[in-house]
Image (tube, helix red, strand yellow):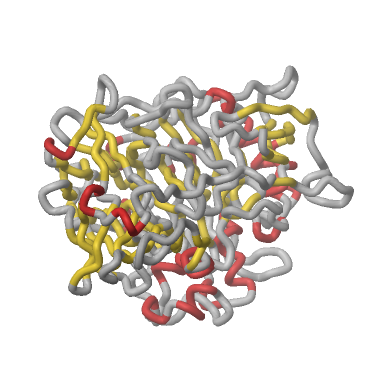
Amino acid sequence: MVILHVLASLVSTTLTVTGGRYGQASQPRLVSNGLEGYISMEVTAPPKEYGYGVSLYATAWPLTTQPIRDFQIGLASIWIVPDNREIEYPLLPKGTVARDNWPERGPSYRDVFQTIEGGLGFWASTRFGSTTAKFRMNGTPDGYNHEISSPGWGFGNTEAFPVDQMGIAQLSSRILVPPDGFTFRAGTNGDVLGYAWMALPLIRAKESTAGYGVPTGDQSWTLFVNAMNCKGPVAFFTPATWSRISRKYPPAAKRGLDSRPGLVTGGAIEVNTVPRYVSKDAKGVTYTKIPTLQFPADEQGRTILIHDLTHYSKDAIYRQVESWLKGGSVPEGRFDLVGASSPTVTANELSLRQGEAHLPISGFTGRVGTKALDRTTFGLEWDKSALQPWSKQMRRGTFPEYFREEGGRMIAVREQDVPEETGLRSAAFPRAESIQSYASPEGPGSAWTMPGPKAGPFHVRLSDGSVVTYSWYRFIDQPALQDADLSAGERERLQIIAEKIQANWTLNKEYLPPPKVGRLVEIDPALIVKPPKGLEVGYVPIAIRQSPG
């Protein structure tokens, strides 16, 4: 799930025109604004001492029957923002997307100042369409001027970021991170992915940075995953990612995720960009059609969206790592539940709208609704009459596809109640096409070639059909660490830390608490890589290209 306020405004309202004439009815037009809103839950904000990590389990499944062009719905996930609840002055300067365009977020703009978000989902900027959800680790350090989503790339940008806009450093030597997002084993449907963002003291805090004179905290927010075939730390945001904004805007100093606890108060499916067909019947009544949105449900009619969201204090793992780096014993890596707090889930009512006028949708009542399925599990509950068989393990629930405009609302109707002359029944949504490639600079003088890789290139084909080309870099030589505000001594210290983590926190250990419901998902086996001989420890696989297969 991703807050992409900008994207929705950039998508053209009218995408294309198709269909023929049916009597006096209009032609079906393909436009945007098919669906918007949130399927959301709330949790109580944790005490500040529990703002140093968060974990959850989220369900992955094929939301649509095929990849659809200009389509974006993030599956259930969270937003982590720095805890600045006491601040009332602007944390963002003029010239940032959030401050210039979202006055309702003022005066502090604290909720859109910086975030770690992403998660499972489907995005309009995806270059390689997939019916199964992908996972992206998005973050914005500067009010949505830049959105970082992988080592080297921004969200949906096929051209690699310059080093002063990078922020995610690869840590694992076994898990490859594609620019277009993690893929899962083909056929994934209803399995849960566990993941956590934990603040670790990998890089020491400093009160004044060389050449910039701004303070930077010690928090390296690190992604851990829990899947069937791989577990453990994958990558982290460097502290300098969050403090960069204060180099030119001093009020932001010590207010970013490098220094402040992380605040999480809920989770949601964010419905952002969905195409729709619009047509009128011979009487001038407006009807619309959206793509089939399908959800896995168990025999009880429940769809699990988020399970076991947990807040963590420094006692969970931060202090273990801190002691380790000061010469103590190597921790196992498992989160200590002494430092864990599980809030109670509260479900918000289903709230979805359609069209440029944001008309509320009616027709979900009696079919499906949001619900706290137990104290720590949020999801949907379906009327069993609305479900169809889908597999041996689950049933299939679908949202309404057809709507009629009436009295300032969009009323869900059955397909057979849509007049034939509208042409909507036969209207098909354009399939997403894989026609663009992500590519890193190849010439001399870039962070990708100086110091450059030690081995490669190598190639793997993913379940979305794309091919990822990657090379092996010494950990500290990867592009994302070339503007991390590190001295020569700090770079070597961080290299040693990475080597210790790779040697001790392996793929077969347990880190997150296991889920109480659901089966763990399998990450695409092609993304589980093996280092070349001699590069087993201290090196990382870095994607340098992703292209159509």
Residue drawn at point x = 59 percent, y = 45 percent: 433
Q: Residue 162, image x and y in percent? A: 72, 58
Q: Furthest-top residue in view?
A: 533
Q: Is residue 313 above or below residue 354?
A: above
Query: How many numbered dots are placed on residues in this image?
Result: 0
> In the visual, does 108 lie left or right of 213?
left
> In the visual, does 138 lie left or right of 270?
right
Image quarter of the C terminus: top right
> In the visual, does 134 lie left or right of 214?
left
Residue drawn at point x = 42 percent, y = 61 percent: 21
Residue 365 appears in the figure: yes
Q: Is residue 512 above or below residue 422?
A: above
Q: Residue 22, image x and y in percent? A: 38, 60
Taking depth in this image into account, of 318 and 266 the one nearest to the observer is 266
Q: Residue 412, image x and y in percent? A: 21, 56
Residue drawn at point x = 77 percent, y = 30 percent: 457
Taking depth in this image into account, of 387 and 529 the one nearest to the observer is 387
Q: Is residue 128 above or below residue 268?
A: above
Q: Residue 419, image x and y in percent? A: 27, 56
Residue drawn at point x = 52 percent, y = 37 percent: 182
Q: Furthest-front residue in view?
A: 23
Residue 255 appears in the figure: no
